[in-house]
Image (spheres, rainbow, N blue to C red):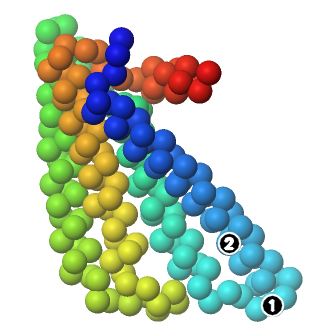
Amino acid sequence: MEKSSLERFCDLIEKATLDITMVLCAVMVVVAWMHVTMRYVFNNALTWSEEFLRFSIVWYALLSASILHKRNGHLGITIFREMLPEKLQKFFQRIVIYLATLTMGVVAISGIILVMNTWAQITPALGISMGIPYAAIPVSFLLMTLYGVMHIVRDIKGQPPLSAVQTESAQAESKE
């Protein structure tokens, strides 16, 4: 089945986000290693590494959550839904997509306001704007909102929801 332009765009954004998270993870490993080495071998801790790692892990976690959302990989409590008749199960499955997208859009807007309100604050160790670490919220939730819109479009077209397995197999096929 041919992918829509929205799905192809979302795939491109997902790949870029995945690349960014991999680089960020590698940088965090190097900085953590440097921090431990400097502290315990040279008895002279880096002043900025703990703050950098704290902010980086937030960015890493939220960007990873956006990738997971695109792949419909988030955990869900299905025990109650599975007790319902099949028609109600499908209804609740569909309504969750719409409510989640709306919620993520609201969080993204709130995150933008947070970034604007904290932009003038400076972090103690890195000396950067507090808006930079807080920007992880609107960036990742805007991505999740975009992916939610993609899921809604698929639902409107009557296509089945994406799963993490389908996404990974499609990526493997595109690499061949």
Residue 47 occupies quadrant: bottom right
Q: Position of residue 159 (x, y in %)?
A: 25, 15
Q: Nearer the viewer, residue 43 or 9?
A: 9
Mark 2 belongs to which amino acid? Val
The 10 Å Cα crowd at callout 2, few under 14, some 14 to 19, many 20 or more, is some
The secondary structure type at the circle numbered 2 is helix
- Seen as rendered, the residue at the extreme right is 41
Which of the two residues, 76 or 108, is positioned nearer the viewer here? 108
Q: Quick check: can you spot residue 165?
A: no
Q: Is residue 126 left or right of residue 62?
A: right
Question: Which residue type carries mark 1?
Answer: Asn
Point out the tag, 2 or 1, that comes first from the N-terminus.
2
The residue at the point 15 percent across, 54 percent down is 106
What separation in Å lies between label 2 and label 1 (alpha carbons)? Answer: 16 Å
170 relative to 142, above or below: above
Residue shown at 45% from the left, 62% from the top? 59
| Any part of residue 21 in sight | yes
Work out whether residue 156 or residue 86 is closer to the camera in this orientation and state it.
Answer: 156
Res. 31 mark: 2
Q: Is residue 9 left or right of residue 113?
A: right
Q: Is residue 24 above or below residue 157?
A: below
Does 145 sit above or below residue 165? below
Picture quadrant of residue 83: top left
Q: Position of residue 85 (x, y in %)?
A: 16, 8
Q: Which residue is painted at 53% across and 79% down in the image?
A: 51
State the residue position of label 1: 43
User: SS class of the residue under badge 1?
Assistant: loop
- x then y, percent, for residue 36: 75, 76
Residue 7 percent across, percent down from the top left: 32, 30
Q: Marks 1 and 2: in contact by CB < 8 Å?
A: no
